[in-house]
Amino acid sequence: MRVPPQPSLWRVLEPKWRTALQRIREERSRGGSGKLLILILVGVGFWIGVFGVLYRILKYFRGVEDVGPLLAGKILGVVLLAFVGILVLSNVITALSSFFLAKDLDLLIAAPVDWLRIYLAKLSETLLHSSWMVALMAVPIFAAYGVVFRGGVLFMPYAVLAVFPLLVLPAVGGSALTLALVNIFPARRTRDLLSIVALGAAGGLILLFRLIRPERLASPEGFRNLLDFIAVLRTPTSPYLPSEWVSQAIMEFLRGKVDLMPLALLWSTAAAFVTLGALLHRRLFAPGFTKAQEAAERFVRGGWWRLTVGTMLGFLPVAKREFVIKDIKLFFRDTTQWSQLILLAVLVLVYLFNIKTLPLHRGEAVGFFYVTLVSFLNLGLAGFVLAAIAARFIFPAVSLEGRHMWLLRSSPLDLGALLWSKYWVGTVPLLALALLLTGLTNVLLEVRPFMMAVGLVTIAGLTFAIAALALAFGALYPQFETENAAQIPTSFGGLVYMMATIALLAAVIFVLWQAVYQYVRSVYLGRPMVVEASMLVWFAVAAALCAAVTAASLWVGLRRMERMEF
Amino acid sequence: MIRLENLTKHYGSFVAVDDISLEVPRGALYGFLGPNGAGKTTTLRIIAGILRPTHGRVLLGGDDVHQQPIAAKTRLGFIPDRPFVYDKLTGAEFLRFVAALYGQEGDAIEGRITELLEVFELTTWKDELVEAYSHGMRQKLIISSALIHRPQYIVVDEPMVGLDPKAARLLKDIFRQFVTRGGTVLLSTHTLEVAEAMCDRIAIIQQGKIVAEGTVNDLRQQHRAGDASLEELFLKLTGGAHVRELAEVLGDGAAA
């Protein structure tokens, strides 16, 4: 029988890029140019921000003789190493979806397409999905290096040449690791394991990085003498790390020399990795794919939630109570959901550590002012952290119900009850976290009772509003087709939600500052602290703002859900 | 009684359902047939209260599904064509959850869950997450969920897809007994033999409009089809009788 010619890689990937093009067309026909403009503006704003900060730092380094360029190289090495760490983790998780759980796999594997094309197609997909964000992030960083060290027009193409293999290496490594793991555990179980391990590792890295306090590198006073300091800077972190090769290639180019050795190392290693990865794929993919079809779990007992939450909520109507229990069960049984709590716990620890290491308590009068100021501004920062958490856990709530709306809409369940359940299931833990974060920060800062009370009440009000905003924007920009909850907040709706929340935070902080300023002035001038009528007005305005945003958001969310069609 | 009055549904400029009026009497098993894309699923989803009609209304036992949704939906059991169930709930938990949506709980519901799981041979799977269920098992679970609150009306879209012959037979028996006891079933299916054998009356929809309605005998008489089968009638009414040259479609491969 005649063997059919093999399709090109481009052809194998055709459904993917055609779908992407179609989505862009649909967005455009829906009047998505405004959306695109907002995305571009936010993206460019972010780029300018990163570029601006780095530009100032590098410009300062450039002025310091001998040490400056070394320090710049060291920073680039650290940044690239962090990128590689993120990329390995992200590739491992993405590879699991693209190689083993994607919906197009049955079609591809049933077709007479050879293993190498499937490998290369899926590797490209994994590479693209897990690296685009890092690649975009690298643009302002390399632009700053190019501008400050006068790299010239050839610098950017050269940087792309150096960085591309650095993206390929973690993609191949991550895919190979996933391939090995799937052959040991069923794919769905591997996903659970991976998400926990990956997030645990990411959390550990962040914690470690923070505890090392890399900012000390910028203050040479800590070293015994300058030579020790320079010696540390000159030593590469490890000569075997590809991130060091890229850093070396880039810094040499910026010094006006083209060193081909690191480039050759990068490209040859990438080629060797792809070859080895392909061979491993040839050997292990078929048994791994078969294993991936196995289900994850067997018998499950859900009596615990019924006993605890069910009993506690005994006063509620049965539909609301069961809805809450259902939401809690789904959350804790889906590791992709709750495993991110590990990362969250680490971030909270880092946050508190940073507050603790602030050099504030140096003089009584100045100390009081700065302590109050930091405690007050911390409300905005804590609000932002809560907004990000709500984006991850509350914003996707409506989208995740999409596929089950046939059941909810055909039953006599009141949509208000659904929204009510989603709101409280999200708000209660968020509120506990908010109070913990603000309370502990204020204890660490040793603030006075007045600021403690202002902080706790404000953050509680903000939490109610932030959770309602997350739910409302989640309903306004639903993503019913997405299976992965983690992808939902990265949508356009997630961006608009974050912008709205930042506006709310700014407004509340501005209003409250009027009251807090009066308090600071009284204490600073040694006057007795009296809560005046004008202060109460400002507090009332802030409370009304939070209440209005909460009520309006929930109302909008409900109206939107009533109009939704499935 | 299920009653559709001038039901219309537009998706932009596309008319999916075009001014349909229909009455399904109490105690009837009513077949709703039509080719792919004719508007069957859209109509059934409007009846179930999932989609809102552009015009017209749906009455379930006198209650408007969109004006008095709670009263209307309490009497309804809906079985969709695509069974999306919460993957991370067990079968028993899912049924308990659905019962709660209809305001029911307690020993009576626990007994009903055991009973339904037994009937559909899912007892050994009841504490297993739905993600491990096959397509047919999910379909059985959804059918159980539609029956858990003892509805008066069942609206069902392609119920036989994915069911093994035993379960298909069981479902036919359940529907027959359900209507014998005064319940009403509106059923959409492509399995014309099933529709012919089970349904008391039939409506055929094409391009969003009802093109024929009545008993199978009524349809034969209306369209002077002698003793033609429902399949032949269906093809005649929906213009699907143009059978292409099979040899041309199958090519040489089939003969090899």
Image: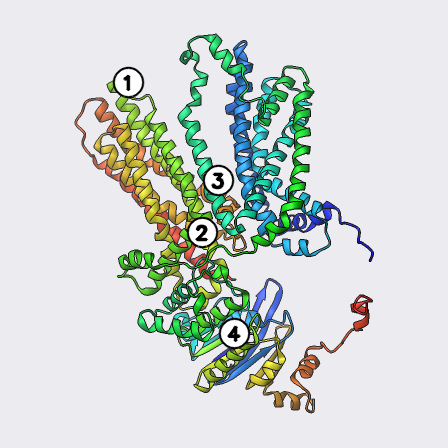
Compared to B203, does A50 lie above or below?
Answer: above
Question: The numbered mark 1 sits on a residue in which chain?
Answer: A
In the image, A482 versus B18, the foreground residue is: A482
Residue picked out by circle 4: B156
At 59% from the left edge and 22% from the top edge, which residue is drawn? A247
Quadrant assignment, res A318 = bottom left
User: SS of the residue at dot 2?
Assistant: loop
Image coords of residue B249 (percent x, y): 79, 68
The answer to whether the residues at label 3 and label 1 have Cβ atoms under 8 Å apart is no
Compared to A74, does A355 lie above or below?
Answer: below
Cα separation, mark 2 vs mark 1, equals 48 Å
Cα separation, mark 4 vs mark 3, equals 44 Å
Image coords of residue B209 (percent x, y): 61, 76
- Packing grade of label 2 (10 A; few <14, some 14-19, many >=20) is some
Image coords of residue A174 (percent x, y): 57, 39
Cα separation, mark 2 vs mark 3, equals 15 Å
Disc 3 residue type (three-letter) = Ala
Cα separation, mark 4 vs mark 1, equals 74 Å
Work out whether disc 2 and disc 1 sit on a shared chain: yes
Mark nearer the viewer, 4 or 1: 4
Question: The numbered mark 3 sits on a residue in which chain?
Answer: A
The answer to whether the residues at label 2 and label 3 have Cβ atoms under 8 Å apart is no
Work out whether disc 4 and disc 1 sit on a shared chain: no
The answer to whether the residues at label 2 and label 4 have Cβ atoms under 8 Å apart is no
Cα separation, mark 2 vs mark 4, equals 31 Å
Disc 1 residue type (three-letter) = Arg
The answer to whether the residues at label 4 and label 3 have Cβ atoms under 8 Å apart is no
Work out whether disc 3 and disc 1 sit on a shared chain: yes
Residue picked out by circle 3: A198
In the image, A187 versus A409, the foreground residue is: A187
Disc 4 residue type (three-letter) = Val
Question: The numbered mark 4 sits on a residue in which chain?
Answer: B
